[in-house]
Image (tube, rainbow, N blue to C red):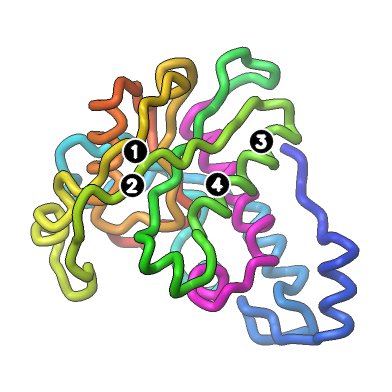
Amino acid sequence: MERPSVSLLDAALDLLLPACCVGCGLGHAQLCGPCRALLEGAEPHLARPLRPPPGLPEVYAALPYDGTVRQALLAHKERGALRLAPALGHALARAVRAAVPLDPGHAAPLLLVPMPSTARATRARGHDPTTRLARAAARTLRGSHVPARVLPVLRHARAVADQAGLDAAARRRNLRGALRVDRPCRELRSGHVLVVDDLVTTGASLADAARALSEAGADVLAAAVVAAPTRL
């Protein structure tokens, strides 16, 4: 798989606006060389919650959710560190390839369906982090001659409670039936559909996404995420 490179703009910004690495706190770049290598050298693994919710597809995670990975995901998602997207997207692309090991040049496309953010969260953050990572992953996949497209077709069908403090069973109840496909989409029936997200914990949101996509006629093969806790 082709490795992403730091763009000239990124390098110039790091020189003009030096910052500590979000992963280790050292250096004069948003992401130092060793931390970037950690993300780009991801070795995906099957990530299965201890008590998986019904309907959860196989989930592949690129990296453990700790240290540098945790800090990079939080910086991208909550603090708008958008220049981290290529490296995180590269890791996500590796998880996608582990979930659906297609040969380069395969005719049917990989359709990456990102978990949706709520409209309120998108406004507060100023961007949709999961869709941004999905698009970065798709670019990486296309760079290695694997056809990949992003289909952001999932929406929230109803309000959900804040997940913080909820146990696995409460999260499943909170998220059951919360998602829907927002429009008829023939493409969902024409390719290999994967749900993608930044993180998996209980699997409740991924299971509900798979349900909504299946009801819309998609054959959801798997899910891929950037990271998973060491103990699910």
Q: Which residue is mark 3?
A: 141
**Residue 79 rendering spot, x and y as whole percentages:** 54, 78
Q: Is residue 158 above or below residue 182?
A: below
At horizontal 85% and vertical 60% (from top left) the residue drawn is 7
Q: Which residue is mark 2?
A: 155
Q: Is residue 159 above or below residue 49?
A: below
Q: Amino acid at mark 4?
A: Ala
Foreground mark, 4 or 1, reads 1
Foreground mark, 4 or 2, reads 2
Q: Residues within 10 Å of mark 4 (few under 14, many from 20)?
A: many
**Residue 35 rendering spot, x and y as whole percentages:** 68, 69
**Residue 121 rendering spot, x and y as whole percentages:** 39, 68
* Most common SS among magenta residues: helix
Tag 1 secondary structure: loop
Q: Which residue is mark 1?
A: 182
Q: Is residue 217 above or below residue 123?
A: above
At horizontal 19% and vertical 53% (from top left) the residue drawn is 158
Q: Which residue is mark 4?
A: 134
Foreground mark, 3 or 2, reads 2
Q: Is residue 139 left or right of residue 18?
A: left
* Mark linked to residue 80: none
Foreground mark, 1 or 3, reads 1
Q: Is residue 173 left or right of residue 16?
A: left
Please report whichever mark, 4 or 3, sits nearer to the chain's N-terminal start: 4
Figure label count: 4
* Quadrant in the rendering for residue 140: top right
Marks 3 and 2, Cα distance to the nearest angstrom? 25 Å
Residue range in magenta is 74-101
